Image (cartoon, rainbow, N blue to C red):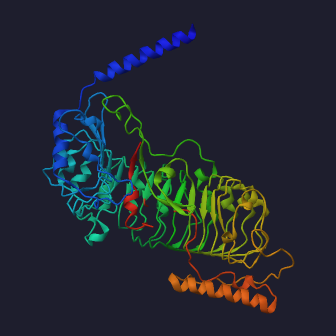
C-alpha cells in the first residue's frame, strides 16, 4: 500500500512539474531580437578561438519555428520566473568581428553573467555602453581581442564579483593589450567592493587590494611584476588562491608574520627571483593548509534563477578557473576550486634547509620546491603529509638518506628527487614501489630498487656548493656529458663520487603539475575561463 502511495505521489509531482513548466512564458521578443541582431553583427571563423572545446554556439539560434525560444539556445540562461536573459556565455564560440557602441548586446540589461572569452573581436575598444549592463556580477573578456583603454564607465558595474580582463589581445597580432589609461587600478578596485575574483594583465601588485576583504582569488601570473613579496596581502580573510608565478619578484619571504594568510590553500610563486631561507613561521601562518580540506572551495553561485524557461537547471555552478601545473600536466581551474591545496616555490634562489614546519601543512596535496639551492636532508616531518599526491624536490643540493617514513604517503603519485646529493637505500613499501628510475636520476649515492645499483658500503662525500641554473639545450648537453663522466670515473676508479657531482647543470622540465593559466603564456587566457555547469 505504501509503495502504491509513493508511486501515486511521484506521478502527481511529475504532472504538476510538467504543467507548471508548460505555463512558463517564452523568452521576451525584444531580447530574442537583440540576440539575433548581435549574431548577425559577427561572423564565425574556426581561427577565432584556440580552445580545443570551442564550437559555434550561435548556430543553434533560430528566429522562427521550433527552437526559436532563446531560453533554450546554446550559451543562454534565463530567469525561471521572469524569463529574462541573465546569462550570456559565448566563450570559445569562433566569433569574430567588431563590437560597436550601438551593439544590441547592451540591450540585455538583465544580464548578471557575460562571458565573451576566447574569441576575436578584432581589437575593438570596450564600448562605454558596457555601463548599461549594471546588473553584471561576472564579466570575462579574456583572450578576446579587445584593445585600447578600459573605459572608466566599467566602474559603474558596482555589483561585479568576478572580473577577468587578462590576455585581452590576440597574441599573434602584435597589437597592444588593454590598458587602464586614465583609470587607475586603485580606482577600479575601490569601485568593486564585492570583488572576489580578479584576473588582470601587467602591472604592480596594488596595495589597494588589501581593502578587498572579499577577494578569494588573485591571479597576476606572468605580469612582469617587479617587486618584493606583497606581505600586505596578509589578513585578507577569504583569499584562498594567490598566483604570482612567472614574474620578477625578488627579495626574501617574510619570517615575521602578522595576521598571516588564514584561508590560503593555493600559492604559486614559481619562476621568480626570490631568495633567502624558507621561513618556517610563514608556513605556520597558512592555517587553512594545516587542516585537511573539507567541503568545497569552489567559487559557486547556486540560485533558482539559473534555469531555463522549462525549469531545467542550466548553469547552476559558476566557477572561475585558474591553471596550474599538476602531476606533469596543465589542469583547468575547475579541479583547483574543488578542494585543492598546493604550494609551488620552484625555480627561485632559495637556500638553506627545508623547514620542518612544512610537515604541519597536513592538507597539502602538491608541493614543489624544485630548482632551488636547498641543502640538508628531507625533513622527517614530511611523513605527516599523508594527503600529498605530488612532491618535487629535484634540482637542489639535498643530502642524507630518504626518510623511510615517507612511505606513509599512501596517496603519493609523483615523487621527484632527481639531481640532488641523496645517498643510501631507497625506501620500499606502498607508493614507493611504483616510482621509476627517473625519480632518482642524478643521485649516484642512492642504491636499491628501482635502480640497478645494489646497496652495500658507499662512500659519503661532501655535497657540492650550489651552482647556478643553466637554460636551454646547452644545459641538457652539459647534463648528459657530466652524467657520462660520472659513469666513466666509476668504472676507472671504482669509487662512488655521486655526492660530488650530484647536482648537475640542467633544467630539464620537471614532471610535476601543470588555462591555461604547452601554452602557458598566450594560451593561458583561453583556458582560464569562467566555467558554467
Q: Quadrant of the C terminus?
A: top left
Q: Is residue 84 above or below residue 428?
A: above
Where residue 89 sits: x, y (%)? Answer: 31, 46
How many numbered markers are drawn? 0
Question: Which residue corresponds to the image point at 72% horizontal and 68% vertical from the top-left?
Answer: 378
Q: Quadrant of the N terminus?
A: top right
Give 88 or 435, whichever is nearer the viewer. Answer: 435
Where residue 376 sits: x, y (%)? Answer: 72, 74
Quarter-wise, where is residue 485 in the image?
bottom right
Q: Is residue 64 above or below residue 422?
A: above
Quarter-wise, where is residue 299 in the image?
top left
Horizontal side of residue 466 vs 212, given as left or right: right
User: Looking at this rendering, what residue extends furthest in the left direction?
Assistant: 102
Horizontal side of residue 320 vs 176, given as left or right: right
Where residue 274 sits: x, y (%)? Answer: 53, 73
Where residue 501 sits: x, y (%)? Answer: 69, 85
User: Looking at this rendering, what residue extends furthest in the right direction?
Assistant: 457
User: Looking at this rendering, what residue extends furthest in the top direction?
Assistant: 1
Give 154 or 19, whichever is nearer the viewer. Answer: 19
Give 307 or 58, whichever is nearer the viewer. Answer: 58
Question: Which residue corresponds to the image point at 73% horizontal and 61% vertical from the top-left?
Answer: 432
User: Looking at this rendering, what residue extends furthest in the front direction?
Assistant: 66
Horizontal side of residue 504 vs 208, given as left or right: right
Give 356 or 13, whichever is nearer the viewer. Answer: 13
Horizontal side of residue 239 vs 421, given as left or right: left
Amino acid at each position: 500500500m505504501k509503495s502504491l502511495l509513493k508511486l501515486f505521489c511521484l506521478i502527481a509531482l511529475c504532472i504538476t512539474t510538467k504543467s507548471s513548466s508548460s505555463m512558463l512564458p517564452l523568452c521576451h521578443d525584444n531580447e530574442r531580437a537583440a540576440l539575433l541582431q548581435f549574431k548577425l553583427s559577427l561572423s564565425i571563423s574556426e581561427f577565432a578561438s584556440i580552445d580545443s572545446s570551442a564550437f559555434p554556439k550561435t548556430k543553434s539560434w533560430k528566429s522562427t519555428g521550433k527552437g526559436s525560444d532563446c531560453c533554450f539556445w546554446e550559451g543562454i540562461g534565463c530567469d525561471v520566473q521572469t524569463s529574462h536573459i541573465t546569462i550570456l556565455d559565448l566563450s570559445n564560440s569562433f566569433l569574430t568581428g567588431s563590437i560597436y557602441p550601438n551593439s544590441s548586446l547592451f540591450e540585455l540589461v538583465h544580464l548578471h553573467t557575460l562571458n565573451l572569452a576566447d574569441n576575436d573581436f578584432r581589437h575593438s575598444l570596450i564600448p562605454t555602453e558596457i555601463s548599461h549592463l549594471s546588473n553584471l556580477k561576472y564579466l570575462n573578456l579574456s583572450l578576446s581581442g579587445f584593445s585600447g583603454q578600459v573605459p572608466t564607465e566599467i566602474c559603474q558595474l558596482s555589483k561585479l564579483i568576478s572580473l577577468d580582463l587578462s590576455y585581452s589581445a590576440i597574441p599573434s597580432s602584435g597589437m597592444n593589450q588593454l590598458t587602464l589609461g586614465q583609470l587607475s587600478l586603485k580606482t577600479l578596485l575601490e569601485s568593486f567592493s564585492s570583488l572576489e575574483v580578479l584576473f588582470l594583465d601587467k602591472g604592480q601588485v596594488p596595495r589597494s587590494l588589501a581593502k578587498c576583504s572579499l577577494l578569494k582569488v588573485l591571479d597576476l601570473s606572468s605580469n612582469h611584476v617587479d617587486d618584493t613579496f606583497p606581505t600586505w596581502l596578509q589578513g585578507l580573510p577569504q583569499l584562498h588562491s594567490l598566483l604570482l608565478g612567472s614574474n620578477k619578484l625578488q627579495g626574501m619571504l617574510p619570517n615575521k608574520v602578522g595576521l598571516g594568510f588564514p584561508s590560503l590553500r593555493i600559492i604559486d610563486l614559481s619562476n621568480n627571483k626570490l631568495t633567502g631561507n624558507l621561513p618556517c613561521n610563514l608556513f605556520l601562518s597558512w592555517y587553512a593548509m594545516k587542516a585537511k580540506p573539507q567541503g568545497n572551495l569552489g567559487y559557486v553561485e547556486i540560485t533558482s534563477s539559473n534555469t531555463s524557461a522549462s525549469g531545467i537547471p542550466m548553469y547552476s555552478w559558476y566557477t572561475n578557473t585558474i591553471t596550474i601545473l599538476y602531476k606533469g600536466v596543465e589542469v583547468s581551474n575547475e579541479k583547483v576550486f574543488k578542494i585543492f591545496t598546493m604550494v609551488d616555490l620552484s625555480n627561485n634562489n632559495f637556500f638553506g634547509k627545508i623547514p620542518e614546519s612544512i610537515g604541519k601543512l597536513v592538507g597539502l596535496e602538491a608541493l614543489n620546491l624544485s630548482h632551488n639551492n636547498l641543502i640538508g636532508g628531507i625533513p622527517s616531518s614530511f611523513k605527516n603529509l599523508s594527503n600529498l599526491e605530488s612532491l618535487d624536490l629535484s634540482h637542489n643540493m639535498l643530502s642524507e638518506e630518504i626518510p623511510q617514513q615517507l612511505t606513509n604517503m599512501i596517496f603519493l603519485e609523483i615523487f621527484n628527487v632527481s639531481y640532488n646529493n641523496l645517498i643510501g637505500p631507497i625506501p620500499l613499501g606502498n607508493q614507493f614501489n611504483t616510482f621509476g628510475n627517473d625519480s632518482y636520476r642524478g643521485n649516484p649515492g642512492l642504491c636499491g630498487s628501482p635502480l640497478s645499483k645494489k646497496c652495500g658500503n658507499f662512500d659519503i662525500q661532501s655535497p657540492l656548493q650550489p651552482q647556478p641554473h643553466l637554460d636551454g639545450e646547452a644545459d641538457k648537453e652539459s647534463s648528459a656529458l657530466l652524467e657520462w663522466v660520472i659513469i666513466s670515473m666509476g668504472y676507472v676508479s671504482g669509487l662512488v663520487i655521486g655526492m660530488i657531482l650530484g647536482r648537475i647543470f640542467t633544467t630539464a622540465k620537471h614532471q610535476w603539475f601543470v588555462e591555461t593559466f604547452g601554452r602557458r603564456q598566450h594560451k593561458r587566457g583561453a583556458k582560464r575561463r569562467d566555467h558554467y555547469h
